[in-house]
Structures are given as structure tokens and as C-alpha cells.
Amino acid sequence: MKLASMFLLIASSAALAAQTKTPPTPKPAVQHAPAAAGSVTCTKLPAISPKIPALPAGSACFKPLYTIDSTPPVKVNDASAPVVASVIDYFGFGPTIVSLSYVDTRIGTGAPAALHKWYSVKYTGYLVDGTVFDSSDSHPDHAPFVLQQGAHKVIPGWDTGFYGMRVGGKRRLFIPHQLAYGPRANGAVPANADLIFDIELVSQSDKDPTPPPAAGANAGTPTFKAIPGTPMGTSTNPAPSNAAPPTARPVPAPPATTTPGTAAPPATAAPATTPPATTAPKPQ
């Protein structure tokens, strides 16, 4: 009887302790606070001419769309030291950190810009001194420029400069020379020139929206369109759409033809002069 009472007392004490034990405090969920608006690092750009139109009021600063770090430098093998230095200088290789920077001046409401789509784009290109070196508005038809994203038909800063845009959006790009024409001059663009582009993504499609050339008098004549960023004077670069038409060559007159099966009439020769007859001398 005493043993049973003891077990009953122990059980009651354990139950009471279980009821009064403080439950463990749950750990708070990890919260990822959004970055503060002022925490985005603005790109430090070289001096830009005031001739370039000012950004709309309230626009943000230029931010890096991406940054390329090429360290350690590219190695050149199988050459002597002077040749290595010359090759690196010629191609512009070396340790660099370069950013493609942008400011969205109007957020589009259309579909996001997708990779490898055909983009129709309006644009104006500036040098940092304010010179306008190209613009879709300067072309005779004022039509948007068409490119296929990722096809390597334009400068790298263009090919990769539409990331994050939506159709209908506008953006200003700051393209360093490494992502533009590099150490080679191109028309009005000098060597090692940083470029600024105002671009508008008008539309995108799965196929080239450029209409085929109309049949007729111009059938068979190649249609050229300007390609911002391709080296001029190469076989892969069409001439600008505002290029002057080729100078017509004079067409020589066709040779005289004869009826098949008949011989050509002989050339008319001038009549020969008959020498005067001579009289044989009479014998005496």
C-alpha cells in the first residue's frame, strides 16, 4: 500500500512538472530586408558634354548593368617578349575592369526583352563630346533598326544592353570603348571612344520583321541597312541605308547582229585606181 502511494505521488509530480514547464521560444524567421535605395553604387563616368540632352527629371544615376573583370591578364605564348608586348598592345588585351552602365528613363509595359529575339529599336548615338554620330531618325525612312539579340552583328554593348528592359521602355547606355569599337576608328567614331546611346525597345518578335524587297525594277538589288557597331568596309557590313546609290556605268552599244544562217556582208572597199594602159614601142 505504501509502495503504491509512492508511485502515485511520483506520477502526480511528473504530470505537474510537465504542465508548468515553459515551452521553448521559437526562433524568429530570417528576414531579408530590401536594400536601401541609396545603397546602389553609381557608376563613375568620365566628363560628358552638356550638349547631350539631359536625363528626365527624377532619373536615377548610371548603374552597372554588369561588370567584366579580366584579371589575371591574357597570356600570349610561343613568342618572344617584344612580340608578346606588341600583340597585347595591338589587341588591347590586359587586366581591365569594365562596366556597361545604364539609366532607365522610361519603364516599358510590354513583354520583357527575351534572348535571341528580333528587336526593333530607335536610337541616337553620341560621343562624349556631344557629337551625334548616328541616329535612326537620320535614316530616310526613320524606321527602327532591327537586330537579332546575341547574333554578334552589333557592338557588344548593344548586343547585351537590353537586359532587363521591357517593350516600350527607354534607356540610356554608357558603353566603354572596350565594349564598342575598341582601338579601331569607325567612320565618325575615333579609336578608343566611349559611346552613349539613347535606345527605345519598340517591339520584339520571333522572326526578322524586315519586309522582303518589293518585286519590280529593283528586284535583285540587295537591300542594305545600317548596323551600329560593325566594322565599316568589311564584307559582313551592309552599307548604311542612307548611302548614296551606286553611280551607273555607261552601257556600251551592242555589236551589229546578222540574221542567223547568212554571212555578214563584206566590208565595202574603196575602188582601186586603174593605172593607165601602156603602149608597147613599135619596131623601127
Image (spheres, helix red, strand yellow):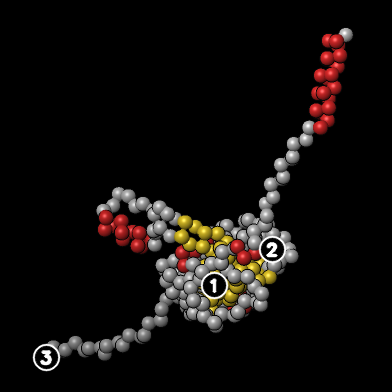
Q: Which mark is residue 196?
A: 1
Q: Nearer the viewer, residue 66 or 211?
A: 66
Q: Nearer the viewer, residue 114 or 69?
A: 69
Quadrant of the frame with the N terminus: top right
Q: CA distance from mark 3 to mark 2?
A: 126 Å
Q: Secondary structure at mark 2?
A: loop
Mark 3 crowd level (few <14, some 14–19, many ≥20, 10 Å Cα): few
Is any part of residue 181 visible from this angle? no
**Residue that numbered label 2 is attached to:** 166
Q: Earlier in the sequence, mark 2 or mark 1?
A: 2
**Residue 238 position in % (x across, y down):** 53, 68
- Cβ–Cβ below 8 Å for labels 2 and 1? no
Q: Which mark is residue 284?
A: 3
Q: Secondary structure at mark 1?
A: strand
Q: Earlier in the sequence, mark 3 or mark 2?
A: 2
Q: Secondary structure at mark 3?
A: loop
Question: Which residue type does callout 2 highlight?
Answer: Arg
- Which of the 4 image quarters holds residue 35? bottom right
Q: Nearer the viewer, residue 41 or 249?
A: 41
Q: Which mark is residue 63?
A: none
Check the image and report above or below for 181 versus 57.
above
**Residue 50 position in % (x across, y down):** 54, 82
Quadrant of the frame with the C terminus: bottom left
**Residue 250 position in % (x across, y down):** 48, 80
